[in-house]
């Protein structure tokens, strides 16, 4: 029984949203590890950025925590929990309001040494990987793809869009992107495989420095949300599967705090968007 608590721990109400969707397999020896403690340990790694072996001793052993994390990222548990929470958040904030727009963008981040899929993004002066995400009009994640930073955004977009098959895109009519996605091969892919239009939002002529692009700030805000998790300040994973899993975990943690805020947390409000 743990006696120490951390700000990243889930509350009783938040655990009630997660627990029913964590698979429990019959047979074998009785479980001696509390799955809630495992979940808190994974969120601790996510929020603090510590290495697995530096987990505080009041958590289950790091090998146990890692084994569950590895299982959940492979068997679809994280995807199931993420998608169910996203539906609850959207229903609570915008009931009976279907998604009609989405936004896509990428973020290049440095990596630690080693691991697969590493490259250089000369435009951003980054050696590492690139996170490609597509979000709905509330900034909630619909798909994520992690590649080497050297991969062109438009080339990766086709693979990213291909991950939308099981996502609620039935009412989406436009996906907004910046000029990096101006690519005729991508236009052809969208026309052949999608029921929505890819809309390029360009910078105003003559603009210098940072410019707020209309209808696309939602995806930039999502990257800011991810930035609150120290594990994501760099890409610290050996595999892109782990990188993508931690992005989903960050959104899961965020949505839990939207649905069941902790005492003392400021109330969160979504701004109206298209």
Image: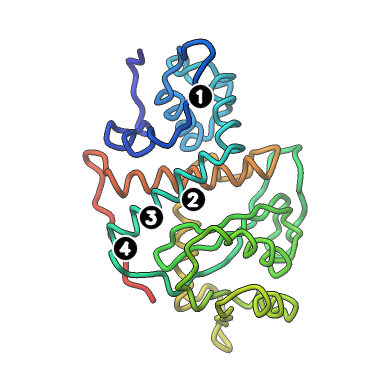
Residue at the farthest front position: 27
How many angstroms separate mark 4 from mark 3 (CA)?
Answer: 15 Å
Q: Position of residue 137 (x, y in %)?
A: 42, 68
Q: Position of residue 22 (x, y in %)?
A: 45, 33
Residues tagged 2 and 1 counted as in contact (Cβ below 8 A): no
- Which residue is identified by label 1? 25
Which tag, 2 or 4, sits closer to the chain's start? 2
Tell me the residue at 63%/78% (across/down).
179
Tell me the residue at 43%/24% (across/down).
35
- Which residue is identified by label 4? 270
Closer to viewer: mark 4 or mark 3: 3
How many angstroms separate mark 2 from mark 1 (CA)?
Answer: 32 Å
How many angstroms separate mark 2 from mark 4 (CA)?
Answer: 16 Å
Closer to viewer: mark 3 or mark 2: 3
Q: Looking at the rendered structure, which numbered label has been put on residue 122?
A: none
Tell me the residue at 39%/64% (across/down).
138
- Is 259 positioned to the left or the right of 140 in the image? left
Quadrant placement of the C terminus: bottom left
Q: What element carries label 4?
A: loop
Q: What element carries label 1?
A: loop
Categorize mark 3 by other alpha carbons within 10 Å: few (<14), some (14-19), many (20+). Answer: few
Q: Where is residue 95 in the image (x, y as percent from the top left)?
A: 28, 64
Quadrant placement of the N terminus: top left
How many angstroms separate mark 3 from mark 1 (CA)?
Answer: 26 Å
Which tag, 4 or 1, sits closer to the chain's start? 1
Q: What element carries label 3?
A: helix
The foreground one among 196 and 267 is 196
Q: Looking at the rendered structure, which numbered label has been put on residue 87?
A: 3
Which tag, 3 or 1, sits closer to the chain's start? 1
């Amino acid at each position: 029984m743990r006696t120490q608590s951390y700000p990243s721990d889930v509350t009783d109400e938040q655990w009630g949203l997660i627990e029913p969707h964590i698979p429990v397999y019959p047979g074998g020896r009785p479980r001696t590890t509390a799955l809630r403690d495992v979940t808190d340990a994974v969120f601790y790694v996510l929020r603090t950025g510590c290495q697995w072996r530096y987990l505080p001793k009041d958590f289950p052993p790091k090998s146990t925590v890692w084994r569950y994390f590895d299982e959940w990222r492979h068997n679809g548990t994280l995807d199931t929990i993420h998608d169910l929470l996203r539906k609850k958040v959207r229903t609570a904030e915008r009931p009976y309001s279907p998604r009609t727009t989405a936004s896509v963008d990428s973020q290049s981040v440095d990596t630690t040494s080693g691991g697969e899929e590493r490259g250089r993004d000369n435009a951003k002066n980054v050696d590492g990987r690139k996170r490609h995400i597509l979000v709905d009009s509330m900034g909630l994640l619909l798909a994520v793809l992690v590649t080497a930073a050297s991969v062109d955004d438009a080339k990766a977009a086709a693979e990213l869009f291909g991950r939308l098959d099981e996502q609620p895109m039935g009412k989406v009519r436009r996906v907004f992107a910046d000029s990096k996605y101006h690519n005729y091969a991508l236009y052809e892919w969208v026309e052949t495989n999608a029921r929505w239009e890819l809309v390029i939002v360009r910078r105003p002529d003559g603009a210098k420095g940072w410019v707020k692009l209309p209808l696309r700030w939602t995806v930039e805000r999502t990257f800011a949300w991810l930035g609150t998790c120290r594990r994501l300040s760099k890409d610290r994973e050996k595999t892109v599967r782990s990188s993508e899993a931690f992005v989903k975990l960050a959104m899961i943690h965020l949505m839990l705090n939207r649905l069941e805020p902790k005492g003392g947390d400021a109330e969160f409000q979504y701004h109206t968007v298209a």
